Amino acid sequence: PVLVVDYGAQYAQLIARRVREAQVYSEVVPHTVSVAEMLEKEPRAIVLSGGPSSVYAEGAPDVDPKLFDAGVPVFGICYGFQAMAQALGGTVEHTGAREFGRTDLASEGGVLHTDLPARHPVWMSHGDSVTKAPPGFSVTASSPGAPVAAFEDTRRRFAGVQYHPEVAHSPHGQEVLRRFLHEVAGIRPRWTIASIVDEQVTRIREQIGDGRAICGLSGGVDSAVAAALVQRAIGDRLTCVFVDHGLLRAGERGQVERDYVSATGVNLVTIDARERFMTALEGVTDPEQKRKIIGREFIRVFEQAERDLKAEGDYRFLVQGTLYPDVVESGGGTGAANIKSHHNVGGLPDDLRFELVEPLRELFKDEVRRVGLELGLPETIVHRQPFPGPGLGIRIIGAVTAERLSILRAADSIAREELTAAGLDRDIWQCPVVLLADVHSVGVQGDFRTYGHPVVLRPVSSEDAMTADWTRLPYDVLERISTRITNEVAEVNRVVLDVTSKPPGTIEWE
Ligand code: XMP
């Protein structure tokens, strides 16, 4: 792999993704990993990422000079660039010329920037600057605040840039990274979706042998793709279990039962547990309590399914759709400021005593979607927007009843139809529709006074759901949604728009 050394900034995962976009496999490692441990992984190259620290700061992580004696190509970015300069005998100074944000880069010669416009914008974020490149390096770019903004030593296969090539604000950044990987480091681009599928299928076969596996489908992308991979590997020795808890949106069960099965031919057991969940949720209004109850019931249903299947054969393996960011965030990387606070309702307890099969552990979300398409899954599944495990249960503010569920389902399905018709599905992250079931509002329809409920539209844009902004939907789309909901859903006489970003508001209302 190419190792991306994480100095604790937000950028390491993004850099790893960009490396893969250049069709080279990458992994994130914390900066506390020793050079010897890195070399054990036989890296094709090492990328030193940006970090929050100044190289002068007390306790600033430094680069072990042994890294540069191993014959492995190294690319330094931002903090990594400065740490590299310092370790190899260049000069880093606190010049007082700080640069944050978009900056004009002037470049000349060298492999990284050849043929790019002589001046182009890049994204900078630094206080200190490299003022002299280490011996053996040529300086190929500068900016107003960084006399040495890029350097390279193609003989030793070392290079670095002061700016952030991984962010979209550096329009040529991906090209620069690609040139480092392919041209300076000489790595052949082989990480393609087809190769990922082949490799995972081989590994799954090795792991499962002639055993059997079970997979809980949530209706979401990750479990769907994980199951499709395992199915490709072991065929009908995989059984998928889909629990209908009655908190699904309109058409979801059908989508799994019909679209998924027709695309994959997988064995699917659907368990209708609607009554059980309704009974357990009766009268419960507290959001955390709802989540706990839904989680607990889910596990019970799943355990029952597992016992039933045991009669057919020994299901020793459990497939889970764990993604690479989850792996990094739970200790694979450092500086994990963003620890996931949500557990999928499908998150099963350890004492189910299965051996886990996690074929997506090395993949980012966008790769998972492409693997899904490669395996022939329909767009409706692969590009599905996130939907919380507890489903509509946490979008009814108040107690959950069958009647309230059907009101919300109808309103939600109108909003989704109109957003899809307006071609907005890829622009928004998701758009929860929330029923304020304990609130009444007065309205007038025809000549009659009505006393119904408001629903809230919560369209958000986001990269990763950790933060989000409310989406500025076109007024005409909002108008169509509002008109249709109030006309077609008798119990709703008011549609309101949530214009809160996250933070301070979470995406869901509960
Ligand atoms: P919040 O409301 O915390 O939501 O801003 C962030 C993202 O997570 C989804 N979400 C959940 N997903 N179980 C899940 O599987 C949950 O309990 C849960 N709560 C929120 C939400 O839809 C959004 O995408």
Image (cartoon, rainbow, N blue to C red):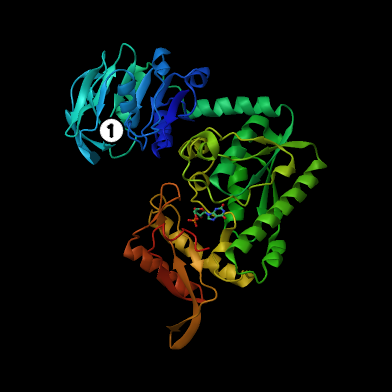
| Residue 497 shown left or right of residue 330 in the figure | left
Dot 1, how many residues are within 10 Å of its Cα: few (below 14), some (14-19), or many (20+)? many
Q: Residue at coordinates 69% horizontally, 46% vertically from top-left?
A: 349
| Residue 310 shown left or right of residue 260 in the figure | right
What x and y, as percent, mark residue 115? 21, 23
What x and y, as percent, mark residue 53? 35, 36
| Residue 330 shown left or right of residue 24 in the figure | right
Q: Does residue 483 lie above or below 246 as drawn?
A: below
Q: Does residue 221 lie above or below 406 as drawn?
A: above
Is the CB–ligand 1 distance for label 1 below 8 Å? no
| Residue 285 shown left or right of residue 446 in the figure | right
Q: How many marks?
A: 1
Farthest right residue? 311
Is residue 115 visible from the viewing direction of this image? no
Q: Which residue is mark 1?
A: 163
Q: Does residue 127 lie above or below 47 as drawn?
A: below
Farthest front residue? 58
Q: Residue at coordinates 42% horizontally, 52% vertically from top-left?
A: 467
Is residue 131 visible from the viewing direction of this image? yes
Q: Residue at coordinates 35% horizontally, 28% vertically from top-left?
A: 80
Q: Quadrant of residue 186?
A: top left
What x and y, as percent, mark residue 455? 47, 70
Q: Quadrant of residue 160?
A: top left
**SS for dot 1:** loop
Frontmost residue, 84 versus 457? 84
What x and y, as percent, mark residue 306? 76, 45
Frontmost residue, 410 versus 460? 460
Q: Does residue 380 lie above or below 121 as drawn?
A: below
Mark 1: amino acid: Tyr
